[in-house]
Image (spheres, rainbow, N blue to C red):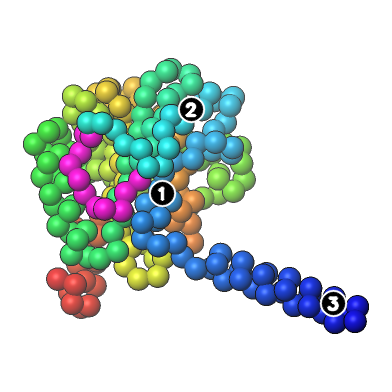
Amino acid sequence: MNNVHWSGILCTVLLLSCCVQIAHATPPPPDGRAYYLLPEPDGPYGNQSVDLGFYITSGYSDERKPSFFPPVSKYRAFRSFTSLKTGKSFFSEVWYFNDWSGFKEDRKHLFAFLQQQGTITPVTLDLTENLARTGDPYVAGLHAREICVTQYSSNETSGYFLVFSTDFFPGENYYIAYYGTDGQSDLVGNNPSLKTLIMSSYPGFVENRKYTYDPSTSLIFLAWAMDNGKI
């Protein structure tokens, strides 16, 4: 009887273990995928000897009101931060797309809006110093050190848009992520903080993954899209 009892318990434990592994391997639904690009400026990403880090001042589902940007994808995430060193406010807003047509159209509308409200410039952002200064071997060893972004400057917010495709989840995956100041136009003076926010989310997300910057303008990606009937 005891043998039967313990056999039953063992089978239950094994079944639960299998269920946990399956659940862990199952990717989150589209409405949960934007959160992966929100900054996590804690732990190894914030070297306290260099700066005092950030205080997270909003939750995942909050948003800035009024928003600096028009509605983009229905799959979005938002988080705001305050620098403990300077008291300045920052925020990140991320939009996720799982279809090419929606991504292409929403990106076009967003960037047309940005051109009307401010100035956009394609630049290469060097995260080398921010990655190296953490003192954490994993973070310092991440490979995405120079990233292609769109610099945005306006009277209300200035920062960087990161637009890319990735194979992180099955199927099509496109991201537009913004990391910027809240109520400030000083981009140069806030660059160290903005780089830290980007560094805490993006390099680790694409490590050992295939990704393409700004796929809507990449000639390589456009060739792939044409071959696969996306355009």
Callout 2 crowding tier (Cα within 10 Å): few <14, some 14–19, many ≥20: some
Type of the residue with mark 3: His
Using the image, determine if residue 169 lies above or below residue 45.
below
Q: Which mark is residue 162?
A: none
Residue matched to label 2: 55
Q: Mark 2 vs mark 1: which is more N-terminal?
A: 1
- Residue 35, which numbered label? 1
Q: Amino acid under label 1?
A: Tyr
Q: From the image, which quarter does the N terminus lie in?
A: bottom right
Q: Between residues 228 and 64, which one lies in front from this camera angle?
A: 64
Magenta span: predominant SS is loop
- Residue at 15% across, 39% down: 114
Give the x, y percent position of residue 200.
47, 41
Task: Tell me the kind of residue under disc 2.
Answer: Tyr
Magenta stretch, residue numbers: 67-77
Identify the residue shown where x is 59% and y is 24%: 49
Disc 1 to disc 3, how far (Cα)? 44 Å
